[in-house]
């Protein structure tokens, strides 16, 4: 022991510290608890392994991990009073159904869109819970009601949808040409003027109105010819 500026400095043998480090490393990297004989066999020189283990156990007794001996085998373990922090939380990943993916795609490219309009585009009725799954994921949300008889709810995508798919804005989505070149759609069956906008069903409704107006004109013409 030496005195320097009235401060006592303890000096431990360098060899002991080095052997402690070696034993510590051996235990830390081990896949299973080790007995004293196994630890000794991995050291380059003979030493009092039991004494080193006792010293390490004392140093680690108040730490987040402790050095413990069970059935004459030593290992590092989480401190017993911290086990609640180590509870493993697992999340189950479920794939979206084909119906949910198709529904999401339609909402993405034709929003705002109603439930019946989605069914018209898909050509089949909704399966139970399909739209609800997307609402639960917070990828779509209700956005007012359409000004038609029955006032159906319209659906649009959310900011969470953009965040999940790492998009800054909806215009970052692939357009008709990009989807066609990727072989995902047949552009010959797509009206590029209305694809990806909320005009789709407005255009369809206008076409239906024109059909009825033509029928009215035809009936009026028929009545006039009979009167003559």
Image (spheres, grey):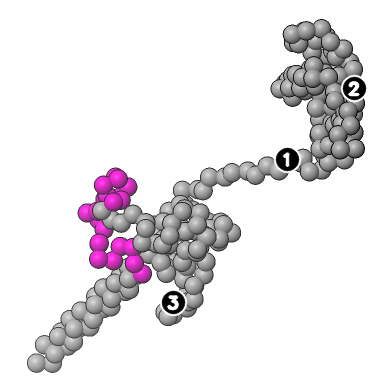
Q: Quick check: 119 left or right of 135? A: left
Name the residue tied to disc 1: 88
User: Gap in Å between the C-alphas at discs 2 and 3?
Assistant: 76 Å
Q: Indicate the quadrant containing the C terminus: top left, top right, bottom left or bottom right.
A: bottom left
Circles 3 and 1 in contact, beta carbons < 8 Å: no
Q: Secondary structure at mark 2?
A: helix
Front-most of 12 and 152? 12
Question: Which numbered dot is residue 54?
Answer: 2
Query: Is residue 83 rendered magenta in the image?
Result: no
Please say whether residue 190 is one of the residues in the magenta stretch. Answer: yes
Question: Which of 209 and 146 lies nearest the eye of the viewer?
Answer: 146
Q: Is residue 222 above or below residue 41?
A: below
User: Which residues are the magenta region?
Assistant: 178-198
Q: Is residue 72 visible?
A: no
In terms of secondary structure, what is the magenta stretch mainly? loop
Q: Is residue 211 left or right of residue 117?
A: left
Q: Are marks 1 and 2 in contact (CB under 8 Å)?
A: no
Q: Is residue 186 above or below residue 224?
A: above
The numbered mark at residue 146 is 3
| Viewer-side label of 1, 2 | 2
Q: Is residue 51 visible?
A: yes
């Amino acid at each position: 022991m030496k005195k320097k500026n009235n401060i006592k400095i303890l000096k431990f043998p360098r060899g002991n510290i080095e052997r402690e480090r070696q034993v510590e490393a051996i235990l830390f990297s081990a896949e299973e608890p080790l007995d004293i004989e196994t630890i000794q066999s991995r050291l380059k020189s003979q030493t009092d392994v039991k004494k080193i283990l006792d010293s390490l156990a004392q140093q680690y007794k108040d730490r987040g991990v402790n050095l413990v001996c069970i059935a004459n085998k030593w290992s590092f373990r989480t401190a017993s009073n911290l086990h609640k922090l180590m509870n493993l939380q697992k999340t189950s990943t479920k794939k979206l159904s084909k119906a949910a993916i198709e529904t999401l795609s339609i909402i993405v490219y034709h929003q705002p869109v109603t439930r019946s309009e989605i069914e018209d585009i898909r050509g089949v009725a909704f399966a139970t819970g399909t739209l609800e799954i997307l609402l639960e994921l917070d990828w779509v949300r209700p956005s007012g009601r359409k000004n038609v008889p029955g006032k159906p709810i319209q659906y649009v995508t959310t900011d969470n949808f953009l965040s999940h798919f790492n998009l800054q804005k909806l215009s970052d989505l692939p357009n008709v040409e990009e989807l066609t070149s990727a072989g995902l759609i047949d552009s010959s069956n797509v009206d590029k003027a209305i694809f990806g906008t909320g005009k789709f069903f407005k255009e369809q409704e206008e076409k239906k109105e024109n059909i009825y107006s033509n029928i009215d004109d035809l009936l009026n013409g028929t009545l006039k010819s009979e009167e003559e």
